Amino acid sequence: MSSKVTASQGKQAIPGVANIIAIASGKGGVGKSTTAVNLAVAMAQTGARVGLLDADIYGPSIPRMMGLAGYKPEIDHQAKRICPLENYGVKTISIGYLVDDDQAMIWRGPMVASALGQLLTDVNWGDLDYLFIDMPPGTGDAQLTLTQKVPVTGAVMVTTPQDIALLDCRKGIDMFKKSSVHTLGIVENMSQFICPHCGESSSIFAEGGAERLSQEYKTEVLAHIPLDISIREKADEGIPIVAAAPDSKQAKGYQALAGEV
Ligand code: ADP
């Protein structure tokens, strides 16, 4: 674990939390949540104290990916605090623990902003070295609420190598720039497909895009994560690949990423 990140000033800090790292993407479906979960667990495996906040109000996937679907967090009524749920050494909170999916789906902007605000301020995290925030996809109000409310130490952008995803990733980096949030680097997800039968590697979503983008924005590519069936299967089972098979080659990219953040 290196400490490339330094706490930013000026916004309301979350008590006990040393570093807030946003995991973001310009568009949905590129593997942002999968990356956030595996990064958080890999970071916890290094001995760090880690939290993961699911800010994807309209499509919370952290409960399922962390094996915590159906669980409800306890509320400390005296302190008026929500107690995070813990699995794989990572404390997590998600709107998915608190309301039914279809209920959150019909919320308007101000309700989303207020729910996000509560997830940021009313959770009893204890002391954390890292709080990872699984950001909602895109560059709208919810993203701005987050970057304006708390001092985000840095952002990790997740993209696939495809042109359309890279275009949206640019918008994401620009949004963080405008909010004075430093982009720590880019994760190229679904970089290569390794055929489970013959072992041949194919660039299904093209290649080299993240490198070009990182040069353009003077940032770095933090990791290349392959498109791999076991990553998807384990995410669906609620056991992140870094917890299910920490010594596997599939886990390596996330472990390397934890070393870079
Ligand atoms: P996002 O948070 O960007 O919407 P998700 O993390 O939910 O994306 O991923 C979308 C889908 O792709 C999920 O089914 C997930 O299991 C799968 N997925 C993500 N990354 C990989 C990968 N590297 N290899 C295989 N499947 C992946």
Image (spheres, grey):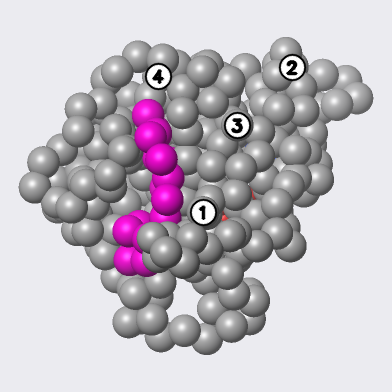
- In the rendered view, does 50 fall on the left or right side of 190? left
State whether residue 165 appears in this view.
no
Q: Earlier in the sequence, mark 2 or mark 4?
A: 2
Real-space CA distance between mark 1 and mark 3, rounded to the nearest whole angstrom: 15 Å
* Circle 4 residue: 260
Residue count near mark 2 (Cα–Cα under 10 Å), binned few <14, some 14–19, many ≥20: few
Question: What residue is drawn where x is 48% and y is 60%?
Answer: 76
Q: Earlier in the sequence, mark 1 or mark 3?
A: 1
Give coordinates of residue 77: x percent, y percent.
Answer: 46, 67
Question: What residue is drawn where x is 35% and y is 14%?
Answer: 2
Give coordinates of residue 24: x percent, y percent.
Answer: 41, 48
**Label number found at residue 83:** 1
191 relative to 200, above or below = below
Q: Amino acid at mark 2?
A: Ser
Question: Magenta stretch?
Answer: 117-137
Q: Amino acid at mark 4?
A: Glu
Tell me if label 2 and label 1 are in contact, CB under 8 Å: no
Q: Earlier in the sequence, mark 3 or mark 2?
A: 3
Real-space CA distance between mark 3 and mark 2, rounded to the nearest whole angstrom: 19 Å
Q: Quadrant of residue 136?
A: bottom left
